[in-house]
Image: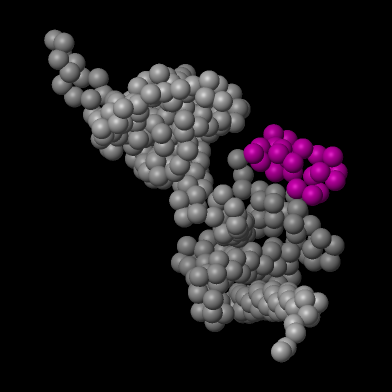
Amino acid sequence: MNIINEDDIDLETTSVEVARVRADGLGSRRAWLLSLLSLALYILLIGVLFGHAIDFHFSTVVIGHPGDAGGFVWFLRWWPQALLSGHDPFMTNDIWYPVGQDLVWSTSVPFLSFLSYPLTLFLTPIAQYNVVLILVLALDAWYGFRLLKRSSHRFVVAWTAGLLVPFSSYVVGQSLGHLDLVTVFPYLGLLFAIQDLVDAEGPWSTAWARLFIYSIISIYVVIIAETGGDMTRFPTAGHLASWAGTCPGSNESAGRVKSTHTRPGNPYLKGALRIAAMSVAKSHDTYLSARYRRISSRRGPIKAIVALEHAMLIAIWNMLTTGSTYCDLGGDYYTRLNPDRARNRAIDQLRKMGYEVTLTPMAEAG
């Protein structure tokens, strides 16, 4: 009879776990090496293609149109130089002296200016601009590659598809002089970070939670884009809801209500609200999902979705006006609001099913 020692089992289990950890470490290292290799290939390819257009005179000839690109050559040097010399970076007298130029509404790319500041130590302004443009396009392709690699899991396919970002017709056209419009990688990086959040184990790992996150982001972007983020133009939250077309119509004559259809509002804002409302209606244990079920049972799902759109806009107006954060009332809000009604409804449902119900408070039952 073979006798198995418990210490042998523990040693074997430990060795298996160590081997698994080592394999995971090697796999992550290999993935990072392939990722860095893809970035190097993007830099090499874009550098050769754009460098060939200027005969590889990176220090003397700008890539693209000299007029538009020349402005960004100046802007890349302006922000660090202004702050180091104690000047106001939003106003300069170097242009249109002595009146000066207000740079608040100019595309001055401060983010790229600070990131590329070390290049000013050993590159000319024109060379700095050319290098920054090539790196920006390469990073655009690289973040596209990293996002696509998660779905395809094939290096060649994801690397080739990543080229669609910097070599799309829009980005190629803007790369001839508009550095600010080709800087796409920060937004792709944000999507990458959000995907990491929703893919991790936790409350955001469900499909509906992912859809909820993406819809909230999309509605925030649309609201800021359509309203400018300035809520002072709407005296009350009701004005914002009415402008967006989420308020019921008021068409009454001689005491008869003819129509309660919502007025035509901003189509882009209303579309984003509709997506977010349909997403949050499927959530659990939230105030908006409870409100959706409460209204849809009486008036139908379409009117319930419009009611959610209205409630979301009211909350958004208050958050942007007062600077407060959103506090969810909870899925049991209506139960806590009127506990007697909730209790009587539950008793009536049980009686209709043929049960005789006697309620005993928990304090007395204990």
Front one among 345 and 53: 345
Q: Is residue 239 above or below residue 45?
A: above
**Count of all numbered marks drawn on residues in the image:** 0
Residue 18 belongs to magenta span: no
Which quadrant does the C terminus fall into? Answer: top right
Q: At which x and y percent is residue 187?
A: 58, 55
Q: At which x and y percent is residue 66?
A: 61, 62
Residue 20, quarter of picture: bottom right
Q: Residue furthest front?
A: 1
Q: Residue furthest top?
A: 254
Residue 316 shows in the view:
no
Residue 338, quarter of picture: top left
- Give me the residue at 38% from left, 24% from top: 358
Front one among 54 and 292: 292
- Give me the residue at 79% from left, 44% from top: 82
Front one among 41 and 171: 41
Front one among 320 and 25: 25
Q: Is residue 297 left or right of residue 143?
A: left
Residue 84 belongs to magenta span: yes
- Give me the residue at 70% from left, 49% from top: 110
Q: Is residue 73 left or right of residue 82?
A: left
Residue 38, quarter of picture: bottom right
Which quadrant does the N terminus fall into? Answer: bottom right
Q: At which x and y percent is residue 220?
A: 50, 41
Q: Residue furthest bottom?
A: 1
Q: Main secondary structure of the magenta part?
A: loop
Residue 199 shows in the view:
yes
Q: Which residues are magenta?
A: 79-104
